[in-house]
Image (cartoon, rainbow, N blue to C red):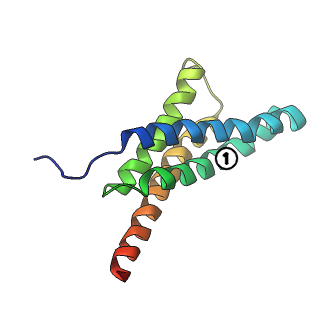
Amino acid sequence: MRSSTRMLWWRVVLGGFLAEVLVFAAVIPVFRTLGQEAVLYVAPVASFVACFFLAWWASRKADGRFVVHGVLVGLVATLLYVALTKAGPEPLAYLIAHGLKIVGGGLGGFVAGRRRSLEVSRA
């Protein structure tokens, strides 16, 4: 049975791409000033925060499946990073960061859906 809720794929892909750009924008200055050790602490936080906000953005225009939209934003961001590094070995902190991208994305989608339901209930 087909769901009537459309996936906003262009928003998912753009959100995942922009989230990964934001992670790089946060991590590169830290790497240049404080070194690789500091990146291991910044990358997971930046991954979560960037995916949360970009998943919220991507999901807020959806008709439903908000969390799915958000999780997909996190997956796109993760897959972009894995593709850029040619799936090379990564430190544990980066693997945690990938998980936090997906969790942050799902939470961003959840918040978008919750806000939508509050708006509908007020109307």
Residue 15 position within the rendered picture, expressed as x and y whole percent measured from the top left = 51, 42
Residue found at x 24% / y 52% = 5
Quarter of image, res 119: bottom left
Residue 2 position within the rendered picture, expressed as x and y whole percent measured from the top left = 14, 46
Q: Nearer the viewer, residue 56 or 10?
A: 10
Position of 36 relative to 53 (above/below) = above
Q: Nearer the viewer, residue 14 or 50?
A: 14
- In the rendered image, the residue lying farthest to the bottom is 122
**Count of labels shown?**
1
Quarter of image, res 109: bottom left
Name which residue type carries label 1. Answer: Ala
Q: Nearer the viewer, residue 89 or 67?
A: 67
- For label 1, the residue is 46
- In the rendered image, the residue lying farthest to the left is 1
Position of 46 relative to 77 (above/below) = below
- In the rendered image, the residue lying farthest to the right is 33
- In the rendered structure, the answer to whether residue 73 lies left or right of residue 25 reads left
- In the rendered image, the residue lying farthest to the front is 123
Residue found at x 40% / y 56% = 61
- In the rendered structure, the answer to whether residue 59 lies left or right of residue 82 reads left
Residue 100 position within the rendered picture, expressed as x and y whole percent measured from the top left = 55, 47
Residue found at x 53% / y 22% = 83
Position of 113 relative to 41 (above/below) = below
Judged from the image, the secondary structure of the residue bearing numbered disc 1 is helix
Residue found at x 50% / y 38% = 14
Residue 78 position within the rendered picture, expressed as x and y whole percent measured from the top left = 52, 35
Mark 1 Cα shell of 10 Å, populated few (<14), some (14-19), many (≥20) = many
Position of the C terminus, as image quadrant, is bottom left
